[in-house]
Amino acid sequence: MRKLALLVGTLLLMLVLGELALRVLWRNPFASESPDLLLTLRWQHNLTDRLVDRSVLHLDPPKVRFRTDARGFIEPVARVSGPEFTLVFQGGSTTECLVVQEDLRWPNLVPVQLEPMGFRVNALNAGKSGNTAHDSLVNLVELIGSSRPDVVLLMNAVNDVGLLAEYGYARHGSNHDGWRVGLRWAGMSLSSHSALAGLVRRALDFPAQNDLAGVRSEAGKLAGQPDPLPYVARVRAWVRTARAFGIEPVLITEPLSSMRNQYTPPWTDAGALALFNDRVRAIGVEEGASVIDLAALMQRELSVRKPEELYYDGLHVNDDGSRLYARLVAQELAREVLPRVRSRAGYSAPQTAR
């Protein structure tokens, strides 16, 4: 043991002496240089398979399955073989639909609604809790554009309101904390090989997603007044980027009901969200992009129905609300978007793996 300690001490002493000598005799060209900026892609992990406990919401069944495919899209994915169209839905938790039954998540249910209308469609759900228009733009470039779906749909507004009211998009941008990112990545990798590491990771990462019992919030408490201009710039860039990849862009306004309870996210400010939705409508007009005004369509539905029948917190849909979202979105796609894509001169479905 003493020999080992002596060996380690000698090695450390040699390293220190070497460092001091180099500092005197050699000019380090990297002395003031910062390391590469690192960007964490806010995307679902590939091949996720877990149960989500929604018993606190008094929904039946009390647990639902949440799976992703090898690319990180939320299952179910390949509904039909040889589809005429492939759609990709981008957004935050209201698109992800974590606590909705697997076969009832509205982005995945839209193709079922479209089939009787004469459209054979597969849909890829790329929603992720907390994502903003900034994240959707990055993911469009990095992960979706190269796959060349026929149509990509974006519903991001409420998370943008919350982020821009307090931090700004820099919070979701690149950073210098490479060692933190590296340690987190190493922990995630280890959790796929070690049950003990998996238990630790679940305790640290997933309680807020899998257990709503501890969630308590007060809706409408924004840290400040969000500036819509950074949001507008990203949504406009998203539309133009989709077209640059040969994909039809479709914008969706984000609904919010009057219902509020302890599960309602604190950044769900109705006035701010209405302002951001108005910006989405304006971008659609200015860019000539289709807008599915789901916020307005849901207001009509809520004029005859109670919000608690469709939402569990006023923002996130339950199973019934998800069915309604799917029907309304499918009707709008069948009315204008898909016929236009189908009839476009020289149109042929992209030959990609779906």
Image (cartoon, helix red, strand yellow):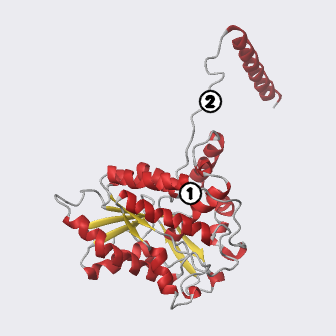
Q: Is residue 138 above or below residue 91?
A: above
Image mark for residue 63: none
Helix, strand, or loop for circle 2? loop
Q: Quadrant of the C terminus?
A: bottom left
Number of marks drawn: 2
Expressed as whole percent of the image width and height from the top left, the position of residue 303 reads 52, 88
At label 2, the amino acid type is: Ser
Dot in front, 2 or 1:
1
Q: Quadrant of the N terminus?
A: top right
Q: What residue is shown with label 2?
A: 34
Write the residue at 63% across / 58% down.
Answer: 226
Residue in front for this viewpoint, 241 or 47: 241
| 157 left or right of 201 in image | left
Seen as rendered, the residue at the extreme top is: 25
At label 1, the amino acid type is: Pro
Q: Is residue 64 visible?
A: yes
Q: Is residue 96 above or below residue 189?
A: below
Q: What residue is shown with label 1?
A: 228
